[in-house]
Amino acid sequence: MHYFRFSGSQLHCEDVAVADLVEKYGTPLYVYSQRTVAEHFQKLDQALAPLDHLICFAMKANSNLSVMRTLANLGSGFDVVSAGELERVIAAGGDPKKCVFAGVAKTEKEIEYALRRGIYSFNVESEPEIVRINEVARRLKKRAPIAVRINPNVEAHTHAKITTGTYENKFGIAFEQVEAIYERASKLKHIWLRGVQMHIGSQLTSVEPFEQAVKKVLPLVAKLKAKYNLEFFSPGGGLGIIYNPALASGDPAWWKSAAAKDILTPDTYAARLLPLLQPLGLRILMEPGRFIVGNAGILVTRVEYVKRTGKKNFVIVDAAMNDLIRPAFYDAYHEIVPLAKKKGAPVSSDVVGGICESGDYFCKDRPLPRVGEGDYLALLSAGAYGFAMASNYNARPLAAEVLVKGNRHALARRRQAVKAIWADETVAPWLKQ
Ligand SMILES: *Cc1c(COP(=O)(O)O)cnc(C)c1O
């Protein structure tokens, strides 16, 4: 469910016509619905209510301060993957004590920063990392809370670039090695074995892989809990969202349709996983990213040219892969709709950006309403891994971001000034003469 709907012939975000936002803020423009963000968090929070639990939003999906503050105000914690992200949590008004720190490459500096800020747990991904955390904690005269990220070697049946829970991936510690690692870690004086964690992949659209992975690790988790008095278990993030039909899924009636039956919802997740998790008697953490913000954002772009070649109808827009890389990077699908409904037969179209890369496209050979120069298009479900992965490739400034709540809207990030792109660069002195 989300709050991007046509009202009359105009696409709205909550109660605001997106066309009005375009007029005020320009394009390319990310638009976020605060109500959608909040409701996704709350649905998950309610589904987990029977358990002592903490949701740590995986902020790498969307780290805009307004989005994060929305979640912090609802009591969310955060899954961070760098010291920079932890600083962002603090800047957004979040609580470091509700943060877990994931990632395979934590530096000494990052570990020190996180320890000083008193994070809830390091989700560790290798044995040398545990040794390093112990060293830093000894120097700071602290005990560092950790959880080992188990790689359960379970196939998540998702895109190769977002599968993380098999031995082909760099993440976590192999299931078979985990017990011995806890044993060795328990001898380190500055390590506090606080929990166990896992993550099998992203954009999982069925509950089975979660269930399979949890069932596989449960006996081990129970054993580790008994031995080391652990406090929490995290089955991770990865809940998928609907990219297609993204627009229809904003309609409550759609959720009663046959198509909606197989969708992974917080209720399905809870119905299948709670009976497994409850008997553990552990606090349950979850680290969802996409599920919370994916359907809560769109990218709005202006049609600059329509170019017909012998074979194709190219719709050339002012957003590009530097603004939204998912189609190029993951072969991702984003539903594309004009801001104003169009009449007439659809035309098979490629929507492309202006970057000098053949991979710079948003869709290929897709039937779309006929549009022309000066029309606007919205790429739906762009709230996760959209702006967060944007770059300055081709010296294109980062897009603006807007937050909508009801009939209100506010700039959540101003459009980057072009000069800011090279503000940190210098010309070497010998080149200047
Ligand atoms: C990326 C990531 C997540 C969030 O994944 P989503 O699919 O966005 O929910 C959670 N945990 C870890 C360790 C991750 O790397």
Image: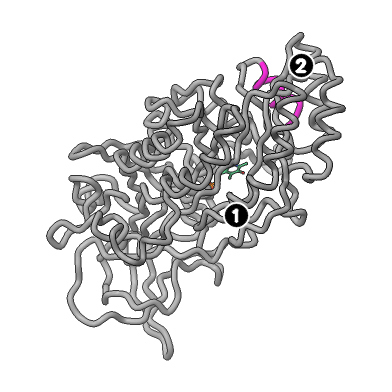
**Left or right of residue 181: residue 368:** left
The residue sitting at the top extreme is: 141
Residue at left offset 46%, top offset 65%: 333
- Crowd tier of the residue under label 1, counting other residues whose Cα lies within 10 Å: few below 14, some 14–19, many 20 or above: some
Q: Amino acid at mark 2?
A: Ala
Query: Residue 377, how many percent across, how many down?
Result: 31, 63
- Up-down relation of residue 320 to residue 92 (above or below): below
Quadrant location of ligand 1? top right
The disc, 2 or 1, on the residue closer to the chain's N-terminal end is 2
Q: Main secondary structure of the magenta part?
A: helix
Mark 2 residue CB less than 8 A from any atom of ligand 1: no
**Left or right of residue 381: residue 274:** right
Q: Quadrant of residue 423?
A: top right
Which residue in the protein does label 1 denote? 209
Which residue in the protein does label 2 denote? 137
Residue at left offset 35%, top offset 50%: 29
- Crowd tier of the residue under label 2, counting other residues whose Cα lies within 10 Å: few below 14, some 14–19, many 20 or above: many
**Left or right of residue 260: residue 177:** right
SS at badge 2:
helix
Measure the C-alpha gap from mark 2 to mark 1.
36 Å
- Up-down relation of residue 376 to residue 179 (above or below): below
Q: Which residues are magenta?
A: 106-115
Q: Amino acid at mark 1?
A: Pro
